Image: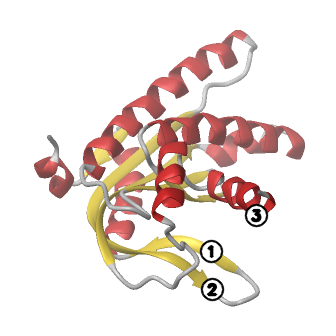
Amino acid sequence: VAKFERTNAQLGKYFSPSIRKEIERLDVDINKRPNKTQMIGIIFTDIIGFTKISEKLEPAEVLELLSEYQKKMTDAIFKNQGTVDKFIGDAIMAGFGIPLAHGGGEDRGVRAGINMIKRLWDWNSLRESDGKPPVEMGLGLNTDKVVSGNIGSSKRMDYTMIGDGVNLAARLESACKSYSARILISDFTYQRLK
């Protein structure tokens, strides 16, 4: 029971409850080295102007803002059966279709992206009523084959996904600023949407 609780708590940091149940049901070992490619939806988000925002805040306030933002975004990812790959400062990397392939990762990724923007707008309404500046975000979404799993050494492991498609999702997110866009998706993702 103790082992189950520890495993469940660890899995809960990365995977939505429905994915977690499926991992447990199928007895998937996520600690194995990556060995197969999967077609998944990949999201990158980034807070626009985060450096300017954080310069006006105390370090504890920056941590509070990031924690609140990440919770709201993670909830939207989990709601759409996504996996949080990692937080990179104010950026979030997530996948839809890992560690278990479900198909339709691009559709779930787009739904998550729209839900993330809606949650951000609702949060900004509360922030503005408290006299705080709004938080804006860009989001890039791509669909491609990636390899996913734990990488690293025996002392430090990281569950992640790797492939050219991940880099394209990050570039799409960066391009949001140039196009004054909230969400940019690749043409390949667009063609696969149902």
* Residue 58 visible in image: no
The percent coordinates of residue 22 (x first, y second) are: 46, 54
In the displayed structure image, the side of residue 3 where residue 137 appears, left or right: left
The residue where tag 2 is placed is 152
> For the residue marked with disc 2, what is the amino acid?
Gly
Q: Nearer the viewer, residue 20 or 192?
A: 20
Instruction: Where is residue 183? Give x, y as percent.
Output: 35, 40
- In depth, the one of 148 and 185 nearer the eye is 148
Q: Earlier in the sequence, mark 1 or mark 2?
A: 2
Provide the residue designation for mark 3: 3
Q: Amino acid at mark 1?
A: Asp
User: Could you give the CA–CA distance between mark 3 and mark 2, rounded to whole angstroms?
Assistant: 23 Å
Residue drawn at (66%, 79%), measured in percent from left and top?
157
- Using the image, tell me which numbered label, if any, was put on residue 158: 1
Place of residue 66 in the rendered image (x, y in percent of width and height, measured from the top left): 71, 42
For the residues marked 1 and 3, what is the alpha-carbon distance in whole angstroms? 20 Å
Front-lying residue, 64 or 48: 64
In the picture, the quarter occupied by the N terminus is bottom right
Answer few, some or many: residues within 10 Å of disc 3's Cα (few below 14, many 20 plus, some between 14 and 19): few
The structure residue drawn at horizontal position 45% and vertical position 49%, both measured from the top left corner, is 82
Q: Position of residue 65 (x, y in %)?
A: 74, 37
- Residue type highlighted by circle 3: Lys
Instruction: Identify the secondary structure beneath mark 1.
Output: strand
Asked if disc 1 and disc 2 are in contact, CB closer than 8 Å, the reply is: yes
